[in-house]
Image (cartoon, grey):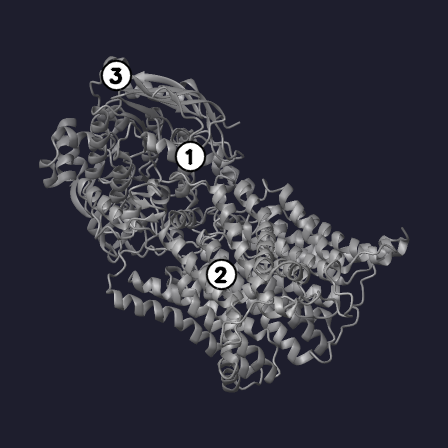
Amino acid sequence: MNRADLHAPVEGAQNEVLVRLEGIGKVFPGVVANDDISLEVRRGQVHCLLGENGAGKSTLISILAGMQQPDSGHIEINGARVAISSPRVAMDHGIGVVYQHTTLIPTLTVLENLMLGDTGRLPLDRKGAMKRLKEVSAKLGADINPNALAGDLGLGQQQQVEIAKAMWQGSKVLILDEPTSMLTPQAIAELEESVNRLKAEGLAVIFITHKLREAYAIGDCVTVLRGGRMAAYISPEELSQYDEEAAKKRILEAMFGDDIDNVSADQAEELAGATRAGQDHDADAAASRPVVLELRGVSSHAGRMEIGIEDVSIAVHAGEVLGIAGIDGHGQSALAETIAGQRSAQKGAVLFEGREVTKLGVRARQRLGLRYVTDDRLHEGIVGDLSVAVNLVLKRIGQAPFWKRGQINRSAVQAEAAERIAEYEIRTPGADTRAGTLSGGNIQKILLARELSHDPKVVVFHKPTYGLDLKTVHRVREAVRRFAAEGGAALLISTDLDELVELSDRIAVISKGRIVGEVANDSSGTSERVGELMTGSTREPSLA
Amino acid sequence: MTEAILVAFLIGTIAAGMPLMLAALGETIGEQSGVLNLGIEGIMLIGGYFGFVAVLMTQSFWLGLLVGTLAGVASSLIMLVLSVWLGLNQIVVGIAITLAGSGITSVLHTQNYGSTNPRLGLDTPWKIPFLSDIPVVGPSIFSQPGMFTVALLIAAAVAWWLHKTNPGLRLRAAGQKPASLDAAGGSVLRTRSLAVLAGGAFSGLGGAYLALLSTGAFTPFMTHGLGYIAIVVTMLARGRISWVVVASLVYGASVAVGTAIQLTNINLPNDVIKMLPFIIVMITLIVFARSAYIPPALAVPYTRGAR
Amino acid sequence: MTTNMQLAPSTGAPQPAPSTDAVPQPKQRGRGRAAVDVLVRTITPVVLALLAGALVLLMLGKDPLQFYGDIVYYGLAGNGWQNSMIAMAPLLLIALGLIIAFRGKLWNLGYNGQYLLGAAIVAGFGPDILVSFPLAIGIPLLAIMAIVVGAAWTIIPALLKAKYGTNEIITTLMMSFIGVSVTNILVKGPFQDASVAVPQTRELPFDGMLPYIPGTKVHIGFIIAILMVLAFHFILKRTSFGLRLDVFGASTKSAKHVGIDARRMTIVIFVLSGAMIALAAAIDIMGLWGYLRTNWNPAYGDKILPFVFLARLNPLASIPLVAFYAVLATGGTIAAQASNLSVDFLLVIVALILMFMTIIEYIGMKRDLGQSYLPQGLRQSLRLGSVGRKKQ
């Protein structure tokens, strides 16, 4: 299908403005999240909201959804000024939201999740809900099993249910907040299809993304946010005049502004997800170097609520980045923790430089040079109530020179902290500041400083750039690259395919706790092959 | 075993089990909505004391039970304001309510009735026609105070409410994932507020049942850990009301066994009998350690959008 | 489950963009200002609780001024201060036991059972041991016996918590009720003094009791308690164990991440906590009571609880607060008798301190963050005039 077809205006009462935001401002203590933002959302249009993490997209959405109240400006719906004082009010105005993080309750059935917004009579109206579900799934072109537990659904299906939930009350405006961040390329294609279908039905769609490519592919018009302000509005007329290259250039300029001089154009494009990054990774060269980390048939299970790993065998060579792709929650945490020593392996062996370390704990492995940059920065990686300095030596409690005869050696800790803070440019009021008060980016720098100093040999990076601003993302990726270039063995676990393709020499795919395949990252089309592995060989759990 | 002992056993089971069941129903409602009320022990004592005073003044057991219920609601207001509205630590507030409840009822009882120690008579039982003539179960199960039947009806109503109604669904959502309820247009604050008040009502009623119908008097600290056992029952039942009922009756039986044994020739120290239910609870906890479950959002105050 | 020790919700700031550098910072203040602030936050709840307690007294028809005056008088004047110091000895150790557990975010609420079992062991075996061994061996031996029993009583809850994450509030409470009954069984059974009609243990030989601090009537248990508090203050603040304990308390996830064995830590914390509480019992029996009656339960832990929080789980800071409660309890017991009031009135005061403490903490936290004192929901419902919202 070519772009002209996809973006053909919808017949009927086209271009009717459903929602108008006028001069919206919102300030949090210390942060201007939204500053004088105005935009219009029209019937039968997909309005893309583009911007990096922290640009103010989420705040704007929560204002529209009634979760936050704007400090200034106002909202008009169908030409009438309204105060969206609560999510209920938003729903009553026909605004349905699909949040970035799932709002489905895993222990309830799909139908119960859908009925949560019902306010009708006292007893649950199952029959009515079943009827409504049929209508909605017909609109979406989806097949949804009402009696499955929400927690048993695959992510693509969860998303369909989320959309059904957002449309449950007869929404006229559908807001999708970063809907693609967890999906495979194939699921993204299905989502795009659903969105186009809804557009044809006459709905207005607000599509939030930080990926330029998606904005161009799916949006009729684009608003770019930067630092809480509107950086650009590209009308449908303007957008239709551009070819892909021109549109990209226009959006990139808006997204980065002056910063574009600091990052090269290529980098900016990569960061903004403008292109499918593909790099020349010489897999053969890496393969000839020694294996530093090896897993042989490792299995590890923990709670009944999460997926462990099953018979995983991988090898990471010195100087290479092995990527692990997979849909979130398919055993990535178990894999990382088993390597780090936080979780014991029930079967198989973990080898470090050829030596078996399966029985060693975190501290012993840390000393050997086996490090782990966790994905849960805030609650696992640091202790928020402790100082930045202590957090920097957190994995070396009791070790010299920071502890002498069981007592903490404060000057040694301070010296270490000063050095790391300078080296990694951690922005903190001081070494004694509580680590929890720092921003996500700086917390990530603490983790990198801690794990990458003092002779690291293998580092597991678990979603290292998730939720960070572009500059820090760039910095983190640089750190991964440099670590491998200097001969380190890196295991990069990520749900961001673009990131994996950009950094990895090889990409293994994990699904339901098993490694289902491996792709050498040496030509274009890597992400398609990875995507196929993610969904193709082992399908998402069936709904039956 | 003689018939008299069997009758005594059944009566004892109901007398000990019903207060627990009511309290555990209240705690279940609270916990399902995400509020852990450790103040249940204190609330039961307050319900028991004020119910007791009401019966002494009016001679009406029904009025006493009503007053006990209302006293429970009133004391759970503290939990409502401090923990649900202000989001303060539920455990600390719960402990405070228990301490305050036990302290104030002891002070009041000592001041007003310390010298006289009045007892209440027996409430006239509802003798269910025909059934009450059956040997053993007739004089025990089918000749209970009317409140016994009402309590069972309450249990059934709670089960229906929790699993078959819109507000019940919202309540469970508030305990599982409050953000989802919020996003779906429900009010976490209101849902939890009502749950806390309902929990207080049932706990107060349970305390009143204990004082008025099971014991026939109020004595300071008379719950003796029953509120905490209600929490255990709640944890094990995981929102299934039938489990609450069965577990409460099993507990009642474990108390009644002791009482029944005292009627026989077996000589068992009173302290052993008192200890028995706790040992049974402890063993149950050890055996079912793996399956005791609480809603994920329990005791976590809800702040919209907090990380 | 989340057994959060935080009294008020953590930064309830509406989610700012997670990546921006300017996350809401508590207002920076001078050290002096901060110290005053802490002091105010510590004292205000106590003052408010005493005021609210006065109201309750008025409603009960008592004279609050008389009552509080009596507390100060009997708690300090004459021999009052010495009695208060004697009362401090076990209270300090129990506070310490709670501080250790709470810092690790483990709710050991089984203190009554742990205390009474420790007391039963000392009172039961003391009369024999103190006459058969020299005191220098007998007294430590009894203390160790009590410690072993008190610590052992925490093992089941500790194991259940470590292995299955079973809520320790419940298990410690259940074990506590069992412990109280076991104590009674022991005192009425094997430990009973056959020569007395009332069930109680034999009395310790007077010579075998803890000696007085020279020039006072205060036994050396007070000094032992102070020394233990200082020792643990050092351990918690300066050693690697102390930091590991804090990391574990802050988040079990972080603890695992940095290689702390969570199971072992849980057990160590519980054992230490139970040990301190049982040591309190040993000192109390050997220093003050000399024997144990049935159905006697001072329930020290219930009453010391708010002061442990007010001390912010800091052992050193617990000393003045425990001293305050010791005066309140010593004077209050006599004052209650004088006013013909149940001693359980102290429970009411303690509960009020707990409640006001959480409220003050909340207000302080909101002020630090520069936010409104009222949560958004409440503010909104006030604005709309009712808790409910009108349907559009």
* Residue to which mark 1 is pinned: A342
Task: Identify the secondary structure beneath mark 2.
Answer: helix
| Left or right of residue A409, residue B133 in this image | right
User: Which label number is shown at residue B92?
Assistant: 2
Q: Residues within 10 Å of mark 3 (few under 14, many from 20)?
A: many
Tell me the residue that label 3 is attached to. Answer: A286
**Of callouts 1 and 3, which one flags the residue occurring earlier in the amino acid sequence?**
3
In the image, residue B23 above or below residue A280: below
- For residue A18, which numbered disc appears in the image? none
Name the chain under label 3: A
Q: Residue shown at 56%/64% (left/top)?
A: C283
Residue B11 vertical position relative to residue A174 in the rendered view, above or below: below
Residue B293 seen in the current view: no
Q: Nearer the viewer, residue A300 or A86?
A: A300
Q: Residue at x 72, y 60 (%)?
A: C191
Tell whether A313 sits left or right of B56.
left
